[in-house]
Amino acid sequence: MITVNRLCKTFRIPVAREGRFAALRSLLSGEQRLKEAVRDISFTIGRGEFVGYIGPNGAGKSTTIKMLTGILHPTSGSVDIGGLSPQLHRQRVVRRLGVVFGQRSQLWWDLPVRDSYDILAAMYRLEERAARLRLGELSELLGLGEFLDTPVRKLSLGQRMRADLAAALLHDPDVLFLDEPTIGLDVAAKRSIRGFLHTLNRDLGTTILLTTHDMDDIERLCSRVMVINHGQLGYDGTIAELRERIGLPTVARVTFRAGCAVPSAAEAAGLPFVIVERAPGALTLAWNRRELTALEMLRIVSAWGEADDVHMEEPAFEDVIHRVY
Amino acid sequence: MKANLRLYVLLIRASVRGAMQYKFNFIGSAFVSALVQFSEFLMVALVLVRFGSVDGWSWYEVGYLCGVMTLARALYRSFASDVHYLEKYLVSGDLDPLLLRPVPLLLALMTQNVRLLVGDLAQGALLVAVCLRELLASGQADWTAIPLTLLAIVSGAVLLFAIGLATAACGFWLTRIEALQNMSEDAARSAAQYPLTLYPRWMRTLLLVALPVGLVSYVPALYIVRGEYGAWLLVAAAGAAAVFLLLALRLWTLGVSRYQSTGS
Amino acid sequence: MLFTVLAKKAYARNLQYRASHLLHNVVSLVFGFIYIRIWAGLGEGSPLGEYGSQGMVAYIAFNQCLLWVTMFITNGLGLEQSVRTGQIALDLLRPAHLFYQAMSREWGQIAYQFLYKSLPIYILYFFMFSLRLPDNGLVFLWTAVAVAFAAYLSICIQYLIGLAALWTIESRWFFWLNYALGMLLAGFFIPLSWVPGWLRALSFCSPYPYLLYVPTRQYMGLDGPGALLGAAGWACALTALGFFATRLARRKLEVQGG
């Protein structure tokens, strides 16, 4: 569906001068600094995939998205969406894309929501009856009925996000790009949007590319994640593989009934796990699941005393990502 | 092309409908806008009332010039309002969402804040009506002046749009174009509301060839109300409008591709 | 002193743009050139009364310079923005009077615009159109006083416009009305001595003539300092009005809660 081949984007930034008449001197000097925002990125997204695209700020995420949507022309490399290049056939490509920006609305600010949909239907050359039908479906799925006639500027953030989603899906696109769709939303709203996206992908087969800083979104929705940093693709694969690759330790806290024979430092060095914390009657350990199963760990620990309770924690996905960054 | 036109009409209706929801605001702002335009004209009118004529042009003739210019501008700004505000879009990055629409960027921009400048249109129409009536009564113009004036207004609107578009396109290179717009749109228009014979030759040439605001009302008026030269003046003005529009569109397309290559 | 602190900050904030501001002065020159040509054309038909054609050049030129300390100052003194963000409630709570705060900031802005706009524009006109400087020191003095009054009156007017934002969203209208009426009644393009009697009377019922017409006539040495008494009167009246409006504003916020 989407093929990106050796994509590069270099910006020329004029060097800022200091001192008197700084602006004028910058303009006249013509000196420029090169900034490589995106370096040699290649990937392929197949139909029906739900991919997360993450990276720290300034890594080149939005630049990539802009090149995928035809807003920006790449310095070199190619983008192919459904057989067309967004650079050469912007309007045709965009007709089959849906895009939602979390921070900026695509709707007409002063007009009622319904009017925006009418305008979009005309822009995308949708047949009137088909458009009405589609709007009805989306309205039911996203609960738009209550505010279809309210001007966009009067909507709450959650309502606006739902309206924007509907706007992006009105013309039944094959591909959906989402940029921070759950930013600023409360827990209930996030959950409902996530549910909707999941349904969209699973039941309707829409290919979705999600850019976000919310790791919960990624974990719950994406089957595959791509990590970009410093303009390059650091990782491209499933979430499970990523966890394994990074190998952050599982942490367990074992409480003992009547104290334990804590091993000395020398003995501890030979163990397949690390003792993070010693408290009276409890031990906190960190170990790698790949090297040792939980059961084996418990067997070793039980030798030191009667274990009363165990509490285990998997590494947070955020921490995993942090490692990749 | 036809689909785009239909889309455009739809957008205008939607925008007007939206504005009508706030009736008080709509009427009030139309009124204020008209008053601003009118007070500008009043400054001119007072001068003429006192002095009778300027450079051989009578009160009614100059009023005609002002009225045609006002109407042409009102048409241009009603149908292409946000082109003039491109700088705002460039600075805030709001141009990108417009590129996500399956229409040419210019169309998307022109349809963003469609606002019929009713007040300005009314004031311009009134002015032209008053002046034409007098000129018709005094026999200086005949009934053909009416359709010809309409033609001049429309071709003038196209010309002003072309100038505005070209100036805005410079924004893709310069970003800050407010001063440029002040000169190419506001100053040039103010100048061309008076007979161009007031200005030195170099300026006259400038206002007829490079920044052809002179072709909006002055040149058509030469024929319509003063009977000088011939009807070919109007044809030439309309033709020039078309040519300038094409040139401006080329510059715009160039600017957009530059924007897409360099980002913002 | 609070006045100098606020004024200096407003002044300094503009300095980063001074290169582009200086460049923009060319625009003013273009406009002035157009108006001067129109008057030259008018002057061919009839003698231009007490001004003469050279005098009209000076009239237009000085008005162009004055615009930057009178008509082109901050819209509503920034109070519309303050109302929108709710900042105004905080500002009204402070020990210094709101008018004092807003005025101090604006004086800094006016000082900047005087140095980087009015003055350079005057210099440009001086060389391009061979303006004559005032003959004696007294004319200089009274011109300066008149200009100071003009700036102060503009501040008062903008203050009232800005406060109007508390009562209506459409305070923009007042701004545009003020601009349109102001240009007309202040004799920007045509000296008030040449407008019909009824209009002149109407103008002098407003503070507008003291923004452009009166200071320019002082500069040209056409009026004695007595003409400035009206300016002083309006200054008192508008200041009083400003204080009254502030009291209303405070009461409105107390009742409504911001």
Image (spheres, coloured by chain):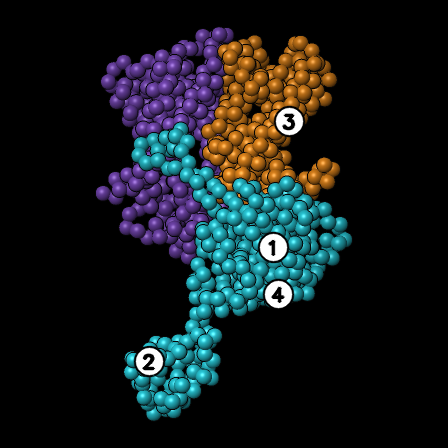
Chain colours: A cyan, B orange, C purple
Q: For mark 3, does the 10 Å Cα neighbourhood hold few (<14), some (14 to 19), or many (20 or more) residues?
A: few
- Residue A281's mark? none
Residue tagged by mark 4? A198
How much space separates mark 3 and mark 2, taking CA atoms?
82 Å
Q: For mark 4, does the 10 Å Cα neighbourhood hold few (<14), some (14 to 19), or many (20 or more) residues?
A: some
SS assignment at label 4 = helix
Residue at 26%, 22% (x, y): give it. Answer: C141
Residue tagged by mark 1? A44
Q: Earlier in the sequence, mark 2 or mark 4?
A: 4
SS assignment at label 2 = helix
* Residue mark closest to the camera, 2 vs 4: 2
Residue tagged by mark 2? A268
The amino acid sitting under disc 3 is Leu
Residue at 55%, 67% (x, y): give it. Answer: A220
Q: Are marks 1 and 4 on the same chain?
A: yes
Residue tagged by mark 3? B246
Q: Earlier in the sequence, mark 2 or mark 1?
A: 1
The amino acid sitting under disc 1 is Thr
Residue at 62%, 30% (x, y): give it. Answer: B249
Q: Are marks 3 and 2 in contact (CB under 8 Å)?
A: no
Instruction: Decide which of B97, C73 is in the foreground and name it.
Output: B97
* Quadrant occupied by the N terminus of chain A: bottom right
* Residue mark closest to the camera, 3 vs 2: 2
Task: Name the chain letter of the residue that bears numbered label 1.
Answer: A
How much space separates mark 2 and mark 4, taking CA atoms?
46 Å
